[in-house]
Image: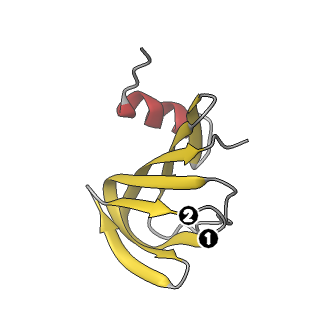
Amino acid sequence: MKMFRLDELDAERAANDGAYLRFLREPRMSAGLYALSPGDTDTQTAHDQDEIYQVISGRAELTVGAETATVGRGSVVYVPAGTPHRFHHITEELRVLVVFSPPED
């Protein structure tokens, strides 16, 4: 079993001065923690993998393809591989658990 604490992952992410920390990579999936502050720009591009986002905390708009929705704590969003997407209009510190399948490179 592998177990992680979100507060420890967030501290490690911040200590490495990055918005994203991949903390798990397995043959069929990978997982990471993504963080954005109000005013930050999400520079993601479409990925080759399917993704699941689970918003742990914060609030923002998320555009996936042509659809936009407000997301916040408890939101879970599926993003199909190859679909442009980004967080924007971030109004509260955003922390998102990201799961890729197959694993990201």
Q: Nearer the viewer, residue 78 or 39?
A: 78
- Check contact, mark 1 vs mark 2: CB within 8 A: yes
What amino acid type should be assigned to the residue bearing mark 2?
Answer: Pro
Q: Nearer the viewer, residue 62 or 58?
A: 62
Q: Position of residue 19 (x, y in %)?
A: 57, 50
Q: Position of residue 97 (x, y in %)?
A: 43, 46
For the N terminus, the quadrant is top left
Question: In the image, 16: left or right of 36?
Answer: right
Give the farthest residue toward the right: 105
Element under label 2? Answer: loop
What amino acid type should be assigned to the residue bearing mark 1?
Answer: Thr
Give the farthest residue toward the top: 1
Disc number at residue 83?
1
Q: Mark 2, residues whose alpha carbon is within 10 Å: few (<14), some, or many (≥20)?
A: some
Disc number at residue 69?
none
Residue sitting at x 33%, y 75%? 70
Question: In the image, 59: left or right of 33?
Answer: left
